[in-house]
Image (cartoon, helix red, strand yellow):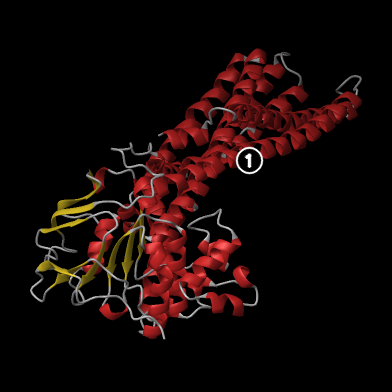
Amino acid sequence: MSVLRDVIWPRGAARPWLLLAAVLAVAAALAGIVLLALSGWLISATGLAGLGLWGTLDIFAPGAGIRAAAVARTVARYLERLIGHDATFRQLARLREAAAAGLLRLPIRQLFAMRSGDTLSRLTRDIDLLDHGLTRLTLPVIAAVATTALFVAWLAANDARLGGLVAAAYFGVGTLLLLITLRLARRSGAELSIASVEMRAFTADWSAGRAELFSLDRATEFGRQVLGASRMVLTAQRRQRRLEALTQFGLTLVGDLAFWIVLKLAFSAHANGQLSAPLVIAMALAAFALVDLWLPLVPGVSFLETLKRGAARVEHLLQPKAPEVGDFRIDSKRPRRIEVRDLHFRHAPHLPELFGGLNLVIEPGERVLIEGPSGCGKSTLLELIAGILEPQQGEILFDGVALSALNPDRLRASVGCLTQGSTLFADTLEANLRLADPEASDARLRQVLEQVDLGRLLDELPEGLESWLGEFGHSLSGGQGRRVALARLVLGEFPVVLLDEPSAGLDAATSVRIWQGLEPWLARRSLLMCAHDAGVVPSIDRRLVCGVDRHWHVEPAATVEGPEPER
């Protein structure tokens, strides 16, 4: 799994910083062991000297060593955290950018199929989880293994039995405990990962729909789903904490065992004149101190399954960009020829078929009005042409290239769609408009607002283009918000325009002014539009009509001449 590998063991420019952080982690761990061992040696030697059992004692050299170890431990730990976190954050920043770009590369239908809470979780929590890969797993493992190995080598140089027993205690029993924890934590880690995603998705859904939920008196009922997912998270976390506590208890026993074994065998060596008494105390304390390096490995090991699942959820967003097909050029602004062949679609198996093998050709620059009763599939047809939905049978072609084979970037650059649920973001008016064209000038923004009859509103706003719209544009009326979304579409300069009830919520006079303002812009584009009121639409070429029996047919546009000029 490349994402997990890149976080645990980064490549490229981050690799040297990881190695430096690892060296500093080992240095900090060694300084801590030396600090405890040397302190024990000095205290023991001082006590023996006071009893007259030790000859001349130089307290200044070991005292200086203790102070040096204390300072080195603090400095090395600080630098290790600074460099390690910096390397991690840089790696995660690149990963977050790549994941966001991967989301944008997905076909529109896949984006619409994803729950907002799930998408948010992938970009935030799943990547934030990877922050712990280096700091909770890689560096602690390197520090514990390297420091234990160096201490075992020092012990073995003084007494081979001591080195072998300490190695068996930590590398044998300690590693076995960690492997058991890793295996047992898989279930709780998987449950925690799944429940966390569900909790965030339910919370996002509840927050987005809270107005409707409260108005229908269903907020409490839906809130129980959020609480249920929260309880699942807490249950999985509680199970993990219990497992971690048991493993840490076992490792503490390993440290106690190592302390008493070293103490007993080292005193035996002291009795034989091989080791001094202060050195025995130093060895025993150092053997016991090693457990402090192994205890932090337990949360990292139990967290590994959650880490792997988070990496897997991010992994598929980083797939290569889809190949470009045909001569469908992104920089071309000419109208497209749209062909619908044998189209079949139903929203669910138990729901009726909507199109029954619809065939339709829309020539470049042609305008088609889609009419029919509510629920016949007008909006669905636009969503199929925009790539938001995928037909169960048949195909849609742009300039002879199947929609399913088109690069999503190229499709989005050529098709602009105003749905009935267009979104305004919690930002300024100009920021919402510049989503379509970040380089647009203020004059251009004012121009498109005037085209949709919002010039007076712009003059009335106290801060003009910099006025804050609020969440979902709540500071605007429904009709004003609809027109801001339409202005944003106009700013995008799409050669194919799909409009779903663009005049919804607007009076006839306002609709007339809007279409008069948009007529020059529409003259260079292919247009498909749904509308219930055919009297307030721009001039069209043909009508696609759905009858009561769901039979689709094309009629001439003789009866639809466009809106009357405003008098």
Q: How many marks?
A: 1
In the rendered image, the quadrant that contains the N terminus is: top left
Residue 177 visible at all? no
Q: Residue at x 86, y 23 (%)?
A: 53
Q: Is residue 30 above or below residue 364?
A: above
Q: Position of residue 9 (x, y in %)?
A: 52, 31
Look at mark 1 in the image and give the residue it sits on: 85
| Spot occupied by residue 10 in the image (x, y as percentages of width and height) | 53, 31
For residue 226, side relative to residue 86 (left or right): left
Q: Is residue 556 above or below residue 160?
A: below
Q: Is residue 441 visible?
A: yes
Image position of 127 with respect to 434: above or below: above
Q: Nearer the viewer, residue 199 or 380?
A: 380
Q: Is 166 on the left or on the right of 3, as rendered?
A: right
Q: Residue flagged by tag 1: what amino acid is it?
A: His
Name the side, left or right, on which 365 lies relative to 185: left
Which residue is pictured at 55% across the width and 64% down the height? 445
Identify the residue at image location x=51%, y=26%: 171
Q: Quadrant of residue 44?
A: top right
User: Could you tell me which residue is drawn at 43 percent across and 79 percent down?
Assistant: 479
Q: Secondary structure at mark 1?
A: helix
